[in-house]
Structure formats: C-alpha cells, structure tokens
Image (cartoon, rainbow, N blue to C red):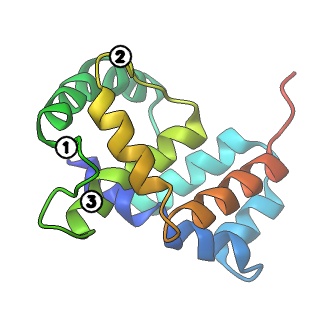
Amino acid sequence: MQLGPVMALVSGPTVGNAISDPENAVAKLVAAVADNKEVVQQLFVRFLNRPGDEAAAETALRDELPPILDYLESVVPDDGGYLVGSSLTLADISVASPFANFIHLGVEFDAAKHPRTKRYVERILARPSFSPMIEREAAFLERTAVPAE
C-alpha cells in the first residue's frame, strides 16, 4: 500500500475542516477520548480499517523514508520553482502534504543531506493555501494533547 494518497486525504483542508466543525466525527472522537494514542488508533481503524502499528511506523521512518527523501532531493527544484510547470500543481500538493503531518509528529529529516527538499517543502507549506491549515491543526493538537506523565 502506498501511503502518499492516504496522507493527502488526511492532511490539509480535510483535517482543518474536520477539527473546526464540532459536529464532525473527528471532533466528537477527540472530545470523547482523552488519550491521544487511542484517538490515533481509532482514526487509523476508521481510515485504513486496521489498527496502527508503531513498529511498522518506526520501520518506515528508518528504512522507507530515507530513499524517498533521496529521490525527492534529486527532483525537487532548488530555484523556487515547482515540480511540473511554472505554477503550483497537484504534484506539489501531493509531495508537500505528508510533510505537514511530519511537522505535527515531530519527525525531522537530515536537512544537511536533503537541503533542496527541505527548502522546497518549507516554501510550499508556507503558502497561504497551506499555512493557515497547518496552524489550525497545530493549535488543535496542542489544545487536545494529553500531558506527558
């Protein structure tokens, strides 16, 4: 299964709209369940029809993400351009969207090894069409975070 399309579905405006509508199932779930890990598990089941697997996530970060970053480093423009043509397209949105989730999760990658990718993603996510949603998501996550024990 490729996670790119799934991540695109669950980031950006989809989550932004969900968390701002108190009648949305996501907002109701978050209000009803205090444990963030349990919220994530329940969302994972709702989206993918199976529970989350932390070991699989760690493996993906360690083994699968680095070659993806290496590939992106070879194809993203380093001059402020876009992946296809001279304007923002679905290609740019699809590539940048998962990085918004990485920000929320505290996942970082080696900017020294992938400087073009870092600059490209930061530029796309800073756009007015992205940044307000990321800010709303971050505020929501901070508001609903369960304090560490």
Q: Which label is found at residue 13?
A: none
- Residue 76's tag is 1
Cα separation, mark 3 vs mark 2, equals 22 Å
- Estimate the spatial distance between the alpha carbons at disc 3 and disc 1, rounded to whole Å: 9 Å
Residue 15 in the image: above or below residue 21: above
Q: Nearer the viewer, mark 3 or mark 2?
A: 2
Quadrant showing the C terminus: top right
In front of the other: 1 or 13: 13
Q: Is residue 49 visible?
A: no
* Residue 7 figure quarter: bottom left
* Between 95 and 120, the one nearer to me in the picture: 120
Q: Secondary structure at mark 3?
A: helix
Residue that appears at 47% across and 63% down = 127
How dense is the environment of label 1, judged by Cα within 10 Å: few (below 14), some, or many (20 and up)? many
Residue 20 place in picture, x, y as percent: 72, 75
Q: Residue at x 69, y 51 (%)?
A: 138
Give the residue pinned by disc 2.
112
Q: Which mark is residue 92?
A: 3
Looking at the rendered structure, the secondary structure element under dot 2 is loop
Q: CA distance from mark 1 to mark 2?
A: 15 Å
What amino acid does circle 2 point to?
Ala
Examine the rendered structure and indicate whether residue 128 appears above or below residue 123.
below
Precedes in sequence: disc 3 or disc 1: 1
Specify the amino acid type for callout 3. Answer: Asp
Q: Is residue 83 above or below residue 90?
A: above
